[in-house]
Amino acid sequence: MSLTSRREVIKTLALGTGSLILSPKILRSANIFKKDRLGIALVGLGYYSTDLLAPALQQTKHCYLAGIVTGTPAKAETWKTKYNIPDKNIYNYQSFDQIANNDDIDVVYVVLPPSMHKEYVIRAANAGKHVFCEKPMAMTVKECQEMIDACNKNKRSLAIGYRLHHEPNTQEYQRIVRQKLLGNVKSVDCAAGYRDDRTDHWKQKKEMGGGVLYDMGVYSIQGARLGTNMEPIAIVSANTSTTRPEIYKNGLDETTTAVLEFPNGVKATIKTSFGENLNYMNIVCEKGDIKIAPYQAYSGVKATSPLGEINNPYNTPWQQAKQMDDDVLSIMNGKAMLVPGEEGLRDIRIVEAIYRSAATKQTVKLV
């Protein structure tokens, strides 16, 4: 919207309400200030922000890196110089709430350990910003719901950072399953993991959201759900283990396996691990199998089936750029997010059920 047209809108509103003065926050909520691109602030400048999201934001068409939030002054200086970020768009965790007054920043992307997701999603929503949140969404279903409620209350969008939902090869195998081009799905086998030799990362700390099921396990759970095009009705069995108790302490899982039951007797076997490299999914259908490997690599997803190869090639970090552009376009066009908070909540519900099944050695029903 041009400056002239903005003035006309404001003038009209003022005349119609007795010289009403509208705050910038109200104007944003009314979507009067239209932009060609939305500004994103990254909260947390660890590996994912540094090596993937920031480079992806140099490739996006509909959004750009507008600001950062970090507790490390040295990182702030490095990012300021590298990405030409103005001082007024650089925050720490104490000054974060002042982001409400910054019209450069439209979206806050929370890229913190899972134990911090709830706090910063809610603070961002209360500041009047749309929110992207990395997976796993939160530590509990209750936290997920509180995050959803805060965004709804503030009329802000919430998207969870599931890049694969935006990925064309993933969308193609979903289409095959959804349209039953190979008949009904009979079973799914999905595994996601890598060898993590760190000893003091948040992923090895239970109180910060550590453990493999919350992290890589979400990919396996997603595989079971997307591969069947159904929601599970029970966790038939589950097991958590570690070969390195000196790292994965106090019951923290290095490896988790589970069998999920879906309607019509369909079962999915999932495995996730910080002890070995795992990256595949096999979808067994009536008329042949869809074999996907790698299933969740940043550099691409590849699949074969009786219908032919599924392989749209691209380079890292294309997935992250596509994800953010898609989500920003949803905000700009007033459409529902492809991966809303409710999708993240569904996976955490399953995570909780898997842990209960592993602890009790019993089937846990989900309906």
Image (tube, rainbow, N blue to C red):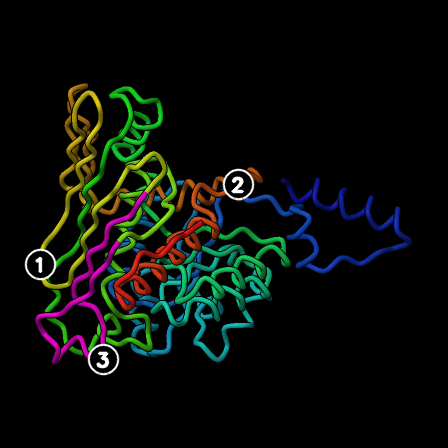
Q: Which residues are magenta?
A: 237-261
Taking the spot 20% from the left edge, 62% from the top edge, the residue there is 239
Residue lying farthest right?
18
> Considering depth in this image, is 362 or 64 the residue closer to the camera?
362
Which numbered dot is residue 336? 2
Label 2: how many Cα within 10 Å (few below 14, some 14–19, many 20+): some
Location of residue 192 in the rendering, given as x and y in whole percent from the top left corner: 18, 51
Q: Are marks 1 and 2 in contact (CB under 8 Å)?
A: no
Q: CA distance from mark 3 to mark 2?
A: 40 Å
Residue beneath the point at 54% across and 51% down: 157
Q: In which quadrant will I find the N terminus? A: top right
- Which is nearer the eye, 241 or 248? 241
Q: In the rendering, which numbered label is found on residue 73? A: none
Which mark, by number, is residue 250? 3
Disc nearest the viewer among 1 and 2? 1
Placement of 34 over or under 21, stated as above or below? above
Q: Which numbered disc flags the more N-terminal residue, 1 or 2? A: 1
Residue 55, magenta (yes or no): no
- Looking at the image, tell me whether mark 1 or mark 3 is earlier in sequence order: 3
Q: Position of residue 50 (x, y in %)?
A: 27, 62
Q: Which residue is mark 1?
A: 276
Q: Is residue 154 left or right of residue 106?
A: right
**Could you tell me the amino acid type at mark 3?**
Asn
Observer-nearest of 18 and 307: 307
